[in-house]
Image (cartoon, coloured by chain):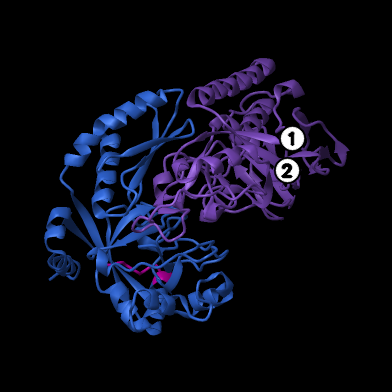
Chain colours: A blue, B purple
Amino acid sequence: MSIRFSFGGDEHIFAEVSEEMSLEAFFTSLSMTNAVRAASIRGVTEICPANASFQIKFDPDQIKPDDLLKELQSMEGAAAKSDASLKTRIMEVPVFYQDPWTHETLMRFRERHQDPKSTDLEYAAAVNGLGSVEEFVKAHSSQPWFVSMVGFVAGLPFLYQMVERKRQLEVPKYLRPRTDTPKLTVGHGGCFSCIYSVRGAGGYQMFGITPMPIYDPNQKVSYLQDEMCFFRPGDIVKWKPITRDEYDAALEEVEANRFEPLIRDCTFSLSDFNRDIDGTNTKLMEVLHGR
Amino acid sequence: MAVKVISPGLSTTVQDLGRPGYYHLGIPLSGGMDRFSLRAANMLVGNDEGAAVLEAVFLGPELEFTAPATVAVTGGDLPPKVNGEERSGWEAFPVKAGDRLSFGFLKSGARIYIAVSGGIDVPLKLGSRSTYTLGALGGHEGRALQAGDELPIGASAAAGGGSVPSNLRRQPGNPAELRMLPGLYWHRITADAGRRFFADTWKVAPEADRIGYRFRGGTPLDFVPRKQPFGAGSNPSNIVDACYPYGSIQVPGGTEPIVLHRDAVSGGGYMMVGTVISADMDLIGQLQPHMPARFVEVTMEQALAARADRAAALQRVRAHLGR
């Protein structure tokens, strides 16, 4: 995989590891950005890993753009050879699929959708060749997902499904983006799922909602007091489908600031995963549930 | 000392030079859209150049001061008034306790910067006082000002005074010329589309805010055909979601370019054809909807020369004011 570098004006270097998404491309991006951080290059001000690419922001008054480019290119070989494994976290995110709030919103924006006569979930099931919404929810929630990027807006995770490519769910984005999306909507576009951290515009299909805050600018939520944003690239997420009653109960816990997400430390090795996807995921589930 | 908000204007926010270091979490820089004007306003009242000021767009707020202070208004031409009496923009003037600052109608530009000696002293959030409204972060309660708000003002450190003559300021031309470095996903559009992109005169669309400025009226882009890569989405303008540089020009569906600004979304799934250079970002903050604009191709060498020009222009303001 040869990285394509391009200047983003006079203050950014944009680096595309691969045109298409894969965990290999993500790990190369992650090891490159880790290497840049470790190198503490003068003039580098922001280091942003993304799904299959990354971006470095720099101050051209401190380092010549061409010099920084050469430095990044010199790191490429080492990043490609690095062991694609990480110490990370696995966490459970409860999702109330087919909730009334995203339903109300998706009905308001039907004219921007590919299939105005169906709901986002019905459409997603159909384009993935699944017979029912229930089957789709099962496909969406039965295997874990990898946080391959954080961004768009504050703390929003992009999630990549940890199954072989032919089983990956793919759904087009809305034809024209909505101007509204409820906060904490679980959405999906292309091969990525996401959780909208704030209310606002969005183009991903809407599947459900989580009661669990993932961004808190006031840092009052018990588990967001140190970091405003819950997710980090490399986190592993397991969706847990919940009912309306479970959603309401979780929301009460959130409002009383007693909600504690289920999080466990774990390790992930890309080569182990590629050798045995189902086996790796089963082990991850054992770690999550403390078995 | 405080400033009371009698009426907030259209969208008035607390801004400084921004909040670097959190873009990897989707938290943008924020800060004044026209940083040159923001720095000049602070210089005029004797503040550090990066002190927090108020940024107002199109319509000015009405403010009341609880103690004497020095005030300056820079940026677009929106005449300030003290107790109804007109004052000059780009010039320091004193206010007394109980004085009211209001504004006439916008003559040119889009945004003004209101500096008060001592600076707007809202709490620092992640190292900055800037408001990021989409993330409800920073500024005054993470939002635009509302009537009844009261903003604390810091202790004034140095004496202000003076004015910045018009030959030391900068305004967008007609059409505005936005210099840009092609790149990023420029290779995705045809050579013809690339030529038309620069030849066309675009117009600022009504959807123009701190996140980004949308342009319309040019020729839709033709894409080089390809099989869409896995994960990108089906439209030829879709890419696997990637980071967006500040100033980058994305063209969803190939129709309307959007230039991301200080409150940029940090990434997404639309191809970008290049990036407006750092020297011209301030100009965008002074564009009104329906204004004509052109994109002008430059090289990295020209971008760096333009950047040095802007630094020299700022240095001339400092020298003129003796700062």
Residue at x 66%, y 20% (from the top left corner): B317
Q: How crowded is mark 2: few (under 14 residues within 10 Å), some or many (20 or more)?
A: some
Q: Which residue does the numbered mark 2 point to in the structure image?
A: B291
| Contact, mark 2 vs mark 1 (Cβ under 8 Å) | yes
> Is A129 placed above or below A47 here?
below
| Kind of element beneath mark 1 | loop
Count of picture labels: 2
Q: Give the percent coordinates (x, y) of residue B286.
A: 68, 39
In the rendered image of this protein, does residue B245 appear above or below residue A43?
below
Q: Of the two numbered discs 2 and 1 on the same chain, state the one appearing first in sequence.
A: 1
Separation of marks 2 and 1 at Cα, in angstroms: 8 Å
Rendered location of residue A165, percent (x, y): 25, 63
The residue under label 1 is which amino acid type? Answer: Asn
User: Which residue is rendered at x = 51% and y = 23% of the image?
Assistant: B304
State which chain disc 2 sits on: B
Of the residues shown, which amino acid type is indicated by label 2? Met
For numbered disc 2, what is the local secondary structure?
loop
Q: Is residue B1 left or right of residue A33?
A: right
Q: Is residue B182 magenta?
A: no
| Quarter of the rendering containing residue B52 | top right
Q: Main secondary structure of the magenta part?
A: loop
Q: What stretch is highlighted in magenta?
A: A254-263
Question: Which residue carries the number 1 mark?
Answer: B174
- Residue B228's spot in the image, x, y percent? 39, 56
